[in-house]
Image: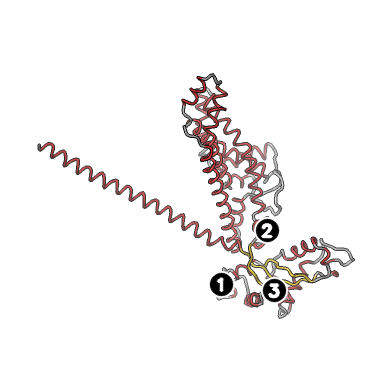
Amino acid sequence: MSDTHSTAEKVAAGLGRRRRKEFVFRTLGMFATGVGILFLAVFFATLIGNGASAFKQTFMKLEVELSADIIAPGGELDLVYADFDGLTRAALRDKLPDASGRSQRREMYRLLSAGAGYQVRDFLKANPHTLGTTQTFWVPAASNVDMLMKGNIDATIDETLRPLSDRQIAWIRSLDEAGDLESRFNMALFTNGDSREPELAGIKGAMMGSLFMLLVTISLSFPIGVAAAIYLEEFAPKNRWSDLIEVNINNLAAVPSIVFGLLGLAVFINWMSLPRSAPLVGGLVLTLLTLPVIIIASRAAIKAVPPSIREAALGLGASQMQVVFHHVMPLAMPGMLTGTIIGMSRALGESAPLLMIGMVAFIVDVPTSFTDPASALPVQIYLWADSPERAFAERTSAAIIVLLAFLLLMNLAAVILRRRMERKW
């Protein structure tokens, strides 16, 4: 009787100790999860707070006289050498007649974006019949004007510590009070290439470069990766050579991405003489980067197919090839597609290997083919983050928001494809 009582006490004491340990472990797990969510919330709040303003841009209203004497001095429209900047500056002088002297006028002209004249030129090119008339234009204001309107420049500090003088701030406020300044959606962020002027800089060139690279990557890495996984899992003999290949594939998945950039520089550019800074080379480098991920995910998906599926197909007289392509592949395809999209997401966010093949160059034109010089969205973020202007800082955050949106969409597509194609057995 005493032994039974003693055993019950030991069990009760041990049960209480185990429950306390479980409570501590669950508490630590909840604390770690909460810390992770907190850091994620701080990250997104900071990112959105810094980048949301980049989707708005300050525009200035100008009444521009399309003078035939300046634009068509010989009676023929001159869109190359005509002084369109002079037309916009004359319109601004009409808005601010109190600017006197060359120094004050130079200060006043710095309120205009360098792209104002190009906007007038493009309008006249599309509407040549407006020559000799006065037209209303909403042209982009300079980045410092935009920063002041958004509250990112403190007008109360000493004049020598801010990029705008007291006179310029007074002009900006007078234009704002007259209704000649307006905040609009920054379409240029999505329709322009890179620029030295923050108010004209956009991500279209980088987005097109990333798109071309991903097309090259997906067209090469998916068929090669899936074929390699099928061969290693279903057809390759189990010997030291296949074991060596498997070990190397697993090791390549953990190699730093910059090593693939060095490999691409040595093979694709120095040896094969492919064009530097081209999406074709970037896509080939990213293919090398994503192949191990796709092979490992595809092999795991093939292994997850129950052996009974293979045995039943073989028992009905199917060949090994028919078993693989008619029975195993359809069941493993959701996992293969998931691994491929995850690999593409990693490729979309990589910048280190692209820096090694020259895609860090300043590219203004939007690429139209796989061999045109181009940048990529992560590289564009890197370039803007290195710029000292405050306007580029907010555009850096905006570009990160766009990149994260693409990554979320790609991962969402992976989840949807997996659920729609998944089969239960």
Q: Earlier in the sequence, mark 3 or mark 2?
A: 3
From mark 3 to mark 2, how far is it between C-alphas?
22 Å
Amino acid beneath label 2: Ser
The location of residue 397, given as percent across then percent down, is: 56, 58
The location of residue 112, given as percent across then percent down, is: 69, 69
- Label 3: which secondary element: helix
Residue 113 occupies which quadrant of the picture?
Answer: bottom right
Residue at mark 2: 195
Residue at mark 1: 154
Q: Earlier in the sequence, mark 2 or mark 1?
A: 1
- Label 2: which secondary element: loop
In the image, taking residue 280 as reference, residue 347 lies left or right, namely left
Residue sitting nearer the eye, 404 or 354: 404
Amino acid beneath label 1: Asp
The location of residue 75, given as percent across then percent down, is: 89, 66
The location of residue 200, given as percent across then percent down, is: 67, 61
In the rendered image, the vertical position of residue 276 relative to residue 91, given as above or below: above
Q: Residues within 10 Å of mark 2 (few under 14, many from 20)?
A: some
Residue at mark 3: 108
